[in-house]
Image: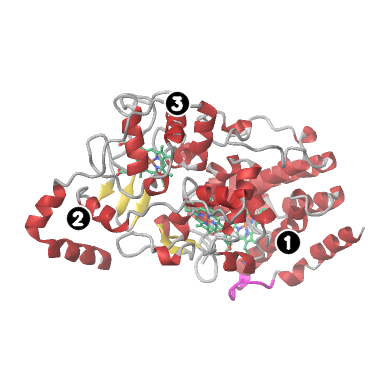
Amino acid sequence: MRTETKLLGGFGVLGAVALGGIIFWPVRTEPAEITLQGDVQRGAYLARVSGCISCHSDFENGGASLSGGKGLSTEFGTFYPPNLTTDATHGIGGWSVEQFAKAVRQGISPEGDPYYPAFSYPFYADMTDQDIADLWVAFQTVPPVNESAPENDVSFPFNQRWGLKLWRAAYLYDPDTESDPTKSDAWNRGKALVNGPAHCAACHTPRNFAGGRILDARFEGNDALPGDSKAPAITPSTLIEGDWTVSNLVYAMQTGITPSGDAFGGSMTEVVQGNTRFMSPDDLEAMATYLLDSSS
Amino acid sequence: MIKKTIIIAAVTSSVAVTALAHGGATGIVKERMDAMAVMGNSVKAVAPMMRREVDYDAEAVKSAAQVFARHSGEAMTKLFPEGSGGGASEVTPEVWSEWSKFEELAEQLGAYSNGLALAADNGLGTSMGSAGSMMGSSSTDSMMGGTTTPMIDFTSMTADIAFNMVAQTCASCHATFREKE
C-alpha cells in the first residue's frame, strides 16, 4: 500500500502536461538489421543460462516448452511470461529478428510499448548481435503452441504501461559487464555472465519502493522476492564466511547442494534446475571465481 | 586412510552438530529438523568426494545412502502431521494442500537412495572438467523438455550422477515445501 501511494505521489508531481508528453515519448531506437548466421546449439545454451526457458515454460503443470510460464506474483501484481513459441498469433512466430532484438535487449514491444521489468531484459542489454542471432535460430526450432498465456493481473496505476517509461528513466541501468584487464580471463567471463545473462542480481540485490535495484547494495540480498521468498547476500565476504569456495559454489550450481550439506530451497532450486545445471564446468567456474571476488 | 577416518568422524559426530539453527523448535518439529540435519551431515560427508576434493570411498557413500533411505518415505512424512507448521518451523502450507506431491518426493528420496547404494561401487564418472564451451553439455542441444527422467538403471550409473539425483530430490522438496526464515 505504502509503495502505491509513493508512486502515485510521484506521478502527481509531474502534472498533466508533462504526463501527456511522457505517454507519447518514444523509447529507444530501432536496432540495425541483423544478418548474422545464428547457431542453434549456442542459442539453446544461452536460453538456458539466461532463464528464458525456465521462466517462459511451466513444465511442472505439463506446459510445453516456452508456451508460457508460471505467474510471477510481486507487490505490483502478477505477471505471466508470454508464449514464445513459433505460433504466429499466440507466440512470436510473426516477429522479425529485429523486433526480437528490441524486446530482449531494450524491453520494448513491436508496438513500441515498454515491458515490465518482471521480464529480466535489463540484464540482456549487452547481448551481441551474434547472441541475438543464436537465440533467434534456437527459438525457430520450438514447435508452435496455439494458446496465449494469461494476461498480467496488475492493478492501477501499475497497469499503465506508459508509467514504465518513468521507471526506465530512473532505474534502467546498463549491466556491468565490462572487462577489467587486470583480472584473469575467467574472472572477466564470470563477470559478464553473472551481471549479464545469468542475472543473479535480479534476486540477490535489494530493490527500492518502485522495484528499482539499489546498485550500492549489489548482492546484499533481497527479502521481498516474488512469492514472499528471500534471497541471502552473495557478496564475497558473506560467501567466504559461509565456507563457499570456487569448487563448492560450482557444485552448488550443478546440484543445489550447499557446503553445509543442506539443499537450496525457494526459487534458487529453479535457477539450478532450469539454468545453471546446464552450464559448462568452465563457465560455472568463471562465475564462481568472479562472485568470490566481485567487489574489486 | 586418514581421509576415511575424518569422514567417519564427521558422520558419527552428526548428532552433536544437529544442535545448529533450530531456532528453539520443540516436539515433532524438532524431531523432523533433527532427521533432516542427520541427512545434511551425510551429504556434507560425501559431497566433497563428488567434487573430487577428497578420495572416493564407496563404503562411505553406501552408508550415506542408507541414512537417506532410513529417513525417507513414511519415516519422513509421519513427522509432518497436519497443522504442525508455524513457529520455529520452516514448512510452507503447501505440505498439506499438496500432500500427495510431498509424499511422492519423500518416496522418491527412498528410491533414489537405494539406487545410490547400487551405484556406489561404480565410482565417479569422468565427465567433470571436460572441455566446456558455449556448446556445453549435450542436454542443452534442444529447446525442449522439462526434467522428466525415463527408465533409470542405477546398476550402470556412476555414483556422482546417482548422488545428483538424490540431491535434486532434496532441493525439489525444499523448493516448494520449505521457506527459510
Q: Amino acid at mark 2?
A: Pro
Residue A137 is tagged as: 3
Report whether A140 appears left or right of B88: left
Mark in the foreground, 3 or 1: 3
Q: Amino acid at mark 3?
A: Val
3 and 2 marks on the same chain: yes
Tell me if I can see residue A33 in this picture: yes
**Residue A249 lies within the magenta run:** no
Q: Write down the residue under mark 2.
A: A157
Residues at marks 3 and 2, CA–CA distance in whole angstroms: 37 Å
**Magenta-tinted stretch:** B19-28
In primary-sequence order, the first of circles 3 and 2 is 3
Element under label 1?
helix
From this viewpoint, which residue is outermost toward the right? B1
Mark in the foreground, 3 or 2: 3
Q: Amino acid at mark 1?
A: Asn
Horizontal and vertical percent for residue A200? 49, 53
In the rendered view, would you say A208 is above or below A166? below
Looking at the picture, tell me which residue is in the foreground, A94 or B16: A94
Horizontal and vertical percent for residue A141? 46, 24
Q: Write down the residue under mark 1.
A: B41
Horizontal and vertical percent for residue A87? 35, 24
Residue at the (43%, 41%) spot, across then down: A127
Residues at marks 1 and 2, CA–CA distance in whole angstroms: 50 Å
Element under label 2?
loop
